[in-house]
Amino acid sequence: MAAAASSTVSGLAGATLARRPAFSTGFTTGARVSARNPVMTTNLERNGRITCMTFPRDWLRRDLNVIGFGLIGWIAPSSVPAINGNSLTGLFFSSIGQELSHFPSPPALDSQFWLWLVTWHLGLFLALTFGQIGFKGRTEGYFDK
């Protein structure tokens, strides 16, 4: 075992600290023992990634077909001129142009831009959500009898 030596610590009025090994055990003889973390040994088998055994890694089940068809499935009906001869997409895009005409200042709270923004995006997110349910439900056989 290493002999304990002391050193002076500057700034502490000459206080001394005893040197000791960074890791010591109460064993004087015997085999070398290394501590093992069961979480880390499990992670080494998975290339160091922490994963949950019960939760699927690809929980979103992302598929670009759903995004493409959902976007087309929303743009097509929202482009039908049903609001006083204008389409929802046309009204939304024209309100973007109107608001960009006075760019540094933000849109007013009573601007029609907010109505078209919320309505258009709500429809888009609903189309994408139902598209994900329908497309994945069909490919995974949820609707088969």
Image (spheres, grey):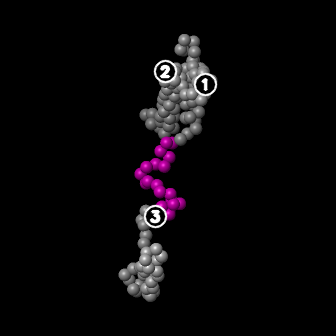
Nearest to the eye among marks 1 and 3: give it.
1
Residue 41 in percent (x, y) is at 46, 65
Q: Is residue 99 visible?
A: yes
Q: Quadrant of residue 16?
A: bottom left
Snapshot quadrant of residue 72: top right
Res 40 label: 3
Q: Where's residue 87, x and y in %?
A: 57, 18
Name the amino acid type tagged 2: Asp
Q: Main secondary structure of the magenta part?
A: loop
Kindly identify the amino acid type of the residue bearing the numbered disc 1. Answer: His
Q: Residue at x 38, y 83 (%)?
A: 27
Quadrant placement of the C terminus: top left
Above or below for 33 versus 72: below
| Label total for image | 3
The answer, for residue 17, to whether it is visible in the render is no
Distance of label 1 from label 3 (alpha carbons): 57 Å
The residue singled out by tag 2 in the image is 110
Q: Which residues are magenta?
A: 42-61
Tell me which label, 2 or 3, sits earlier in the chain. Answer: 3
Residue shown at 41% from the left, 51% from the top: 54
Marks 2/3: CA distance? Answer: 56 Å
> Crowding near pointer 2: few (<14 within 10 Å), some, many (20+)?
few
Query: What residue is shown at x 46% (from left), y 77% (from top)?
Result: 9
- In this view, the residue farthest toward the top is 84
Q: Is 140 one of the magenta-colored residues? A: no
Q: Is residue 50 magenta?
A: yes
Image coordinates of residue 82 in percent, x first then y, are 54, 14
Q: Which comes before the other along the chain, label 1 or label 3?
A: 3
- Label 3 CA crowd tier, 10 Å (few <14, some 14–19, many 20+): few
Secondary structure beneath dot 2 equals loop
